[in-house]
Amino acid sequence: MEKNWKADFIERLNAYAQKGIIPEKYKKNLESFFFSYKASLEREGRWREDFFAFFNTLLDLVKEQIISPYPFQPYHQKIRQPFDYYLFGLELLRPLIDEKQSHVFGLDNLHSILEHLKKGENVILLANHQIEADPQAISILLEKIAPELAEEMIFVAGERVVTDPLAAPFSMGRNLLCIFSKRYIDYPPEEKLKKQLHNKKTMELMSALLSEGGKCIYVAPSGGRDRPNAEGVVEVALFDPQSIEMFYLMAKKAEKKTHFYPLALSTYHLLPPPETIQKELGEARFAEGGAIHLAFGKKIAMEHFPGSEVKDKHERRKMRALYIWNLVKEDYARFPLKLSK
């Protein structure tokens, strides 16, 4: 049975590649993801033959994205019918997670967040970011203790997770505010204006959502994923002061009150990103697996922080970004240390 399922996936993948339906680089990326995923679970004695079904479904979804890419709007709402993209993302990622060794810290702060949302107020989580599947990882950790938040959280997402054929099917199952990050907005140069107009539209929609109230929005002010330092230790990437300021100004203009909280997460070893930043789409995915962690910090005093008395507004914004980054970094330090490979 297992050999047939495996042969079916590999044979279909090879056939699509031979016919030119799936480009060679995406064929290789699917292979590397599949074989690393399987090897990771076999090491833990948790591989099951029915997991092949995940990859046959993923192959169908990737093929569909290559032939006819899904047109993500500036504000995308998760698709659950006729195919449940939300559940598929969780079920594919779940086997890689050692849930018994995974933790959610700061439950009292999470409770405060849920109370704000219940009253129709908003919460913006200023967080670090480690893997493409962070939204799915967060949902898996929250589904038993805060199920509605697990499903309804909105993620500020860069263009790569909505344009890469391997990432797009997972993004289709999430609530997303789609933006072009500062890291990629100038690439290619001829598309800069179009990207800026897109971002303006996204911010207008976000403003409307905050005015509706009851929204929890995750944003990574670093604009990218954390990566390991020279010693192989994954570090929280610095936060961009302009990014934090933009979200803060929008929150102040909203008709409903908005609260800011720090969120630290540790997911790196489920699906480590490439060691270096690359502008071209089609990065390789190598699954590893392990425990993951979340930590909700105390509410951030956005106007009162070390350095808030500085008169120069640019310097003051830098001090605030550094303060919030340190809050996340301190909570991140509570997680078990694991060196990257």
Image: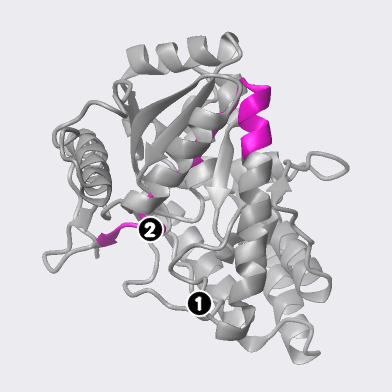
Q: Is residue 94 visible?
A: no
Left or right, 275 with respect to 177, comes to left
Q: Is residue 305 highlighted in magenta?
A: no
In the image as oriented, which residue stretches furthest toward the right? 82
- The reply to whether the C-beta atoms of the residues labelled 1 and 2 are less than 8 Å apart is no
Q: Look at the image and tell me in which quarter the N terminus lies.
A: bottom right
Q: Is residue 301 visible?
A: yes
Helix, strand or loop at label 2? It is loop
Residue name at image x 43 percent, y 69 percent: 183
Left or right, 180 with respect to 39, comes to right
In the image as oriented, which residue stretches furthest toward the left? 231
Whole-percent x and y of residue 301? 29, 24
Q: Look at the image and tell me in which quarter the C terminus lies.
A: bottom left
Q: Which residues are magenta?
A: 207-227
Residue name at image x 31 percent, y 26 percent: 300
Q: Is residue 217 highlighted in magenta?
A: yes
Count of labels shown? 2
Helix, strand or loop at label 1? It is loop
Viewer-nearest residue: 329 or 179: 179
Judging by the rendered image, the residue that carries numbered circle 2 is 225
Whole-percent x and y of residue 5? 71, 62
The colour style of the image is: one colour
Viewer-nearest residue: 78 or 12: 78
What type is the residue that disc 1 sits on? Answer: Asp
Left or right, 187 with respect to 297, comes to right
Please identify, in this view, whether the residue under mark 1 or under mark 2 is nearer the observer.
1
Q: Residues within 10 Å of mark 1 (few under 14, many from 20)?
A: some
Judging by the rendered image, the residue that carries numbered circle 1 is 186
Q: Residues within 10 Å of mark 2 (few under 14, many from 20)?
A: some
